[in-house]
Amino acid sequence: MSKLIIIPIIILLLQIAGYMFLFYGNKHGHADVPIAWIIFNILGIFNLIVLVLSYFLFFNSENKISFWWIPVTIAVITIIILIIQYIRMAMGKF
């Protein structure tokens, strides 16, 4: 495998591990909202890094690997959910 296909696979595995940790911690651990919120924000920061990395390794590359769309889509969905939650918090509904 080339380096270009390994990077999105590693990113996808890290994203899946992060979400599994978040959901497992909520289900079996202490389901404190602030802890889950902090972990979800850390996932959001990680996904911002994924978007910056994908810009340089996918969108500006000559040979585009279509597998990058999976981690990019997960990153965008996570960031959109975080933005919606911040808007709800600002309005006082969360």
Image (cartoon, grey):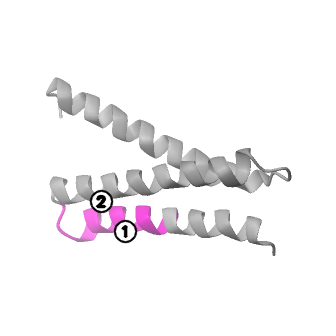
Q: Position of residue 12 (x, y in %)?
A: 58, 63
> Eyeballing the image, is 27 above or below 53?
below
Q: Is residue 20 magenta?
A: yes
Task: Tell me the amino acid under the disc marked 2.
Answer: Ile
- In three-dimensional space, the C-alpha distance between marks 1 and 2, rounded to whole angstroms, equals 9 Å
Magenta span of residues: 16-31
Left or right of 11? Residue 87 is left
Q: Position of residue 47 (x, y in %)?
A: 47, 52
Compared to residue 46, the image places residue 28 above or below, namely below
Q: Tell me where residue 20 appears, x and y as whole percent.
A: 42, 66
Q: Among all residues in the image, which is located at the extreme right?
A: 63
Q: Residue placed at 85% from the left, 53% from the top?
A: 63
Between 13 and 31, which is closer to the camera in this rendering? 13
Asked if the residues shown at circle 1 and circle 2 are in contact, with their CB atoms under 8 angstroms apart, the answer is yes
Q: Earlier in the sequence, mark 1 or mark 2?
A: 1
Task: Say the numbered circle drawn on residue 39.
Answer: 2
Place of residue 85 in the rendered image (x, y in percent of width and height, measured from the top left): 29, 36
Task: Look at 55% across and 48% down and name the residue there.
Answer: 51
Which residue in the structure is indicated by mark 1?
Answer: 21
Per the image, is 75 magenta?
A: no
